[in-house]
Image: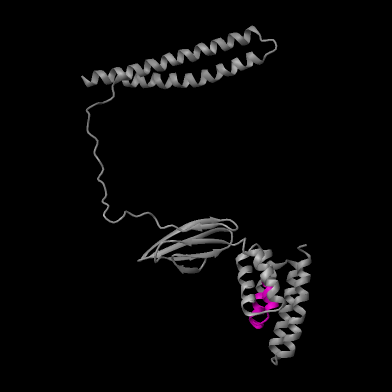
Amino acid sequence: MIRARPLALAFVFVPVFASAQQSDADSDAQADAQTLATRIAEAMAASGCGAALPLMDELQTLLPERHDLRYNRARCHRDLGEPLEALELAEAIVESGEGEPAERARRLIEEESVKVATIASEVPGAILTVEGRSCTSPCRLRVNPGTHFARLARDGEEHESSIRVQSGQNAHALWPAQPEAGETEVAPVEEEDTGYSPGALTGVGLGLAVVGGAGIVGFGLAANSAEDTFDRAMPPSQGQYDRAVRLQRAANASIAVASLGAALFVLELILDAR
């Protein structure tokens, strides 16, 4: 399918140049157009649209009224995954011409319009700029799928954000939140000095709580695993049972250690309050 497109494009170019030779008295321009046509055909055959499209753009400047050439450029943009450029070229054909190129362009518009994404702004009076295109908010700009840098500018301030959009998606460029009129900043509240300073009991208590908590998690998970192994064994062995019992006892001991640590910490708080 993809290899067939260059041949189709090459055949479309043939009447373009024949007509140009009949209507254009400038032989140099005719020669330039014919040379570009040959180079386009070679580029399409060798590398496809990526290499041929710049030459096609150059040829369009020599033949600005040729909508069939403009349609070929739109097809190349479509094949390169650039629906916005394809859509804009097709829209230009429909707006300025009728006949077969316009009819083909309408079908291309139906295909590509659903692939184009938009980035919008609702910030009153801000200038939204994306990929060199600008509009005054509230407005929206059409973009290709992908990641874009959107810039909002208003009253001498600018804010830029990276926005990723997919085919057919609508995204918004947002202005950073600002305090509303009449709002005042709240001064930070200084914490009252309670005079409490951690002592030996706190250190020991927190240490025991940490050790006990780690034991609860570690031994508890191991005990559950051992119990599952014992339950699935056919038949279960005495060794499996003994291991599950030891791990459960270790988990219970860890709970006691953690509880002791917490009790020491609370005890120091009570003694310090006095």
Please say whether residue 36 is visible from this viewpoint.
yes
Point out residue 210 in the picture as x, y percentages from the top left corner: 42, 22
Q: Tell me which corner region of the image, top left, top right, bottom left or bottom right, holds residue 45.
A: bottom right
Who's the residue at 70% across and 12% down the image? Answer: 234
| The magenta stretch spans residue 131 | no
Who's the residue at 38% across and 21% down the image? Answer: 207
Q: Is residue 11 above or below residue 120?
A: below
The residue stretch that appears in magenta: 55-73
Left or right of 2: which side holds 116?
Answer: left
Left or right of 260: which side holds 90?
Answer: right
Which quarter of the rendered picture does the N terminus lie within?
bottom right
* Residue in the foreground of this view, choosing between 136 and 150: 136
Left or right of 69: which side holds 206?
Answer: left
Residue that lies at the very extreme toward the bottom in this rendered image: 25
Q: Main secondary structure of the magenta part?
A: helix
Q: Is residue 99 above or below residue 217?
A: below
Q: Tell me which corner region of the image, top left, top right, bottom left or bottom right, holds residue 18.
A: bottom right
Q: Tell me which corner region of the image, top left, top right, bottom left or bottom right, holds residue 270.
A: top left
Left or right of 244: which side holds 186?
Answer: left
Point out residue 16 in the picture as x, y percentages from the top left corner: 73, 81
Point out residue 266 in the picture as x, y percentages from the top left corner: 31, 19
Which quarter of the rendered picture does the C terminus lie within?
top left
| The magenta stretch spans residue 72 | yes
Figure colour scheme: one colour
Picture mark count: 0
* Residue in the foreground of this view, choosing between 152 and 100: 100
